[in-house]
């Protein structure tokens, strides 16, 4: 087959390609770094012709053009599978909504539950076999494109080619239109500022629990990044990687010689992930690197897969937690922050792993805009807060004041353990609250 001839037959402009979109359609963008750019701008330019176009995306790294048009909500509705700050902004301006998911189930949602009229995403340039790589985000894209009635790919020469499982590439035969954008630089996600003393104290406790040969999953945020930095400077060796999101911390560990993957029962020697976002250092590292492997999220986050990886270590953040051991990593009351993502999958999968451990970490307090300091350990979660990890699933909880394991503890033991890692200024009040809820023994002190 002459793939180049087929490519030329399907090559068109962004403006021509988006003419297939009609009012009322469901339009799916790629994921995170793979959201379209030129196609998004061309769709925004058609806003006066369109109403009620429903667009899906997630972990949005920049404000799409369709969100910038006048009276955007009358023309486009954004539906986010997982919220970033940009997604929250669109929700706040009245044109966006959140779709609650367990991220591991997302490919199945496409196979069984949702419809897709048009799918648009950034991909790498085509190779000699007619394939485009999904680059940084295998995620759910294969099933999304299988469901789409029309597929439009936007070629970006700056996208790294990432080797992967089935579900990480698409062939020109299966594409309806190809557009060539302006090759924008890939959006970067920094690791935040320098780690705080609290970050360091939490990370030190977790790193001490990691054995040689462990397999790692890191969530996004300052504390998991600090753990990654400390591992890179530690004496740990022969670590493996099997994670949802691949971040700069893994690159630091790999370049420091800490990652070999030689002890993994699955995908030996490969760093496996569903999607990646970070700095240019990360994008350069994963480009055609046989040590990394992109995979659909129903593989990376499947608890049955995680259970087969011995000494699996899962490290994630929380917004707050209550004295029953319920963890909220998604909202501040009714204000939506993030999403379940894969956190619950990894909490469960790590516990099922032989020698595995799940860590939920956070600072003990938060300082509000008015300067007031509040405990992030609360009697019960604030009204409207989302339970990301139910009390029956949480294992290790970590703050700068200590680490506790909730497995096997009754309600009064849990309250005692959790209060022991709260900020000392709030412990007496938490004890009083626990007494009122009948989960405190007078002999606890």
Image: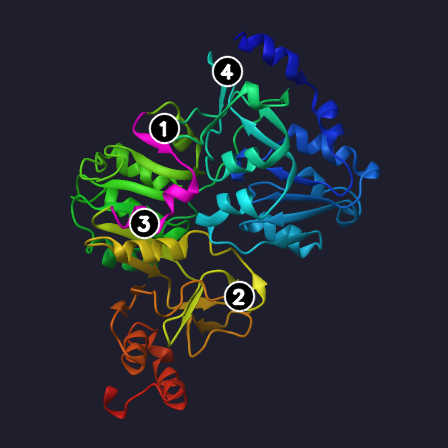
Whether residue 13 sits left or right of residue 444 in the image: it is: right
What residue is shown with label 1?
285
Q: Are marks 4 and 2 in contact (CB under 8 Å)?
A: no
Sequence-wise, the earlier of marks 1 and 2 is: 1
Residue that appears at 27% across and 92% down: 442
Q: Is residue 120 above or below residue 110?
A: above
User: In front of the other: label 4 or label 2?
Assistant: 4
Q: Where is residue 292 in the image (x, y as percent from the top left)?
A: 33, 31
Residue 296 part of the magenta-drawn span: yes
> Residue reaching furthest bottom?
442
Find disc 3 in the rendering and name its residue: 304
Which residue position is annotated with label 4? Answer: 130
> Which of disc 1 and disc 3 is earlier in sequence?
1
The residues colored magenta run 290-308
Above or below, comparing residue 406 to residue 190 in the picture: below
What residue occupies the far front of the structure in this picture?
A: 112
């Amino acid at each position: 087959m002459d793939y180049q001839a087929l490519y030329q037959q399907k090559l068109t402009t962004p403006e021509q390609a988006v003419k297939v979109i009609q009012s009322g359609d469901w339009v799916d963008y790629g994921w995170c770094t793979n959201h379209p750019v030129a196609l998004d701008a061309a769709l925004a330019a058609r806003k006066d012709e369109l109403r009620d176009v429903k667009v899906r995306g997630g972990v949005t790294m920049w404000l799409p053009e369709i969100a910038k048009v006048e009276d955007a909500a009358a023309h486009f509705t954004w539906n986010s599978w997982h919220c970033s700050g940009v997604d929250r902004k669109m929700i706040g301006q009245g044109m966006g909504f959140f779709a609650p998911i367990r991220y591991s189930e997302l490919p199945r949602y496409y196979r069984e539950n949702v419809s897709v009229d048009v799918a648009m995403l950034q991909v790498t340039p085509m190779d000699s076999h007619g394939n485009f790589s999904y680059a940084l985000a295998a995620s759910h894209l294969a099933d999304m494109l299988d469901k789409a009635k029309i597929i439009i790919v936007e070629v970006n020469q700056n996208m790294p080619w990432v080797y992967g499982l089935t579900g990480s590439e698409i062939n020109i035969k299966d594409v309806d239109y190809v557009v060539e954008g302006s090759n924008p630089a890939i959006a970067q996600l920094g690791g935040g500022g320098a780690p705080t003393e609290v970050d360091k104290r939490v990370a030190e406790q977790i790193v001490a629990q990691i054995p040689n040969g462990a397999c790692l999953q890191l969530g996004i945020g300052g504390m998991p990044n600090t753990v990654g930095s400390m591992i890179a400077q530690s004496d740990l060796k022969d670590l493996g990687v099997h994670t949802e999101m691949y971040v700069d911390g893994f690159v630091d560990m790999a370049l420091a010689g800490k990652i070999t993957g030689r002890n993994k029962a699955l995908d030996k020697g490969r760093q496996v992930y569903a999607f990646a976002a970070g700095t240019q250092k990360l994008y350069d590292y994963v480009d055609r690197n046989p040590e990394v492997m992109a995979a659909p999220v129903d593989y990376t986050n499947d608890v049955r897969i995680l259970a087969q990886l011995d000494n699996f270590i899962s490290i994630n953040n929380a917004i707050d937690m209550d004295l029953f051991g319920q963890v909220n990593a998604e909202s501040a009351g009714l204000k939506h922050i993030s999403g379940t993502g894969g956190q619950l999958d990894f909490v469960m999968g790590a516990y099922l792993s032989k020698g595995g451990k799940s860590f939920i970490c956070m600072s003990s307090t938060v300082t509000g805009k008015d300067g007031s300091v509040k405990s992030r350990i609360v009697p019960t979660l604030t009204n409207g807060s989302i339970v990301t990890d139910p009390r029956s699933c949480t294992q290790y909880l970590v703050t700068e004041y200590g680490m506790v394991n909730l497995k096997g503890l009754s309600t009064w033991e849990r309250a005692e353990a959790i209060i022991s890692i709260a900020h000392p200024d709030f412990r007496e009040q938490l004890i009083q609250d626990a007494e009122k809820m009948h989960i405190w023994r007078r002999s606890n002190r």
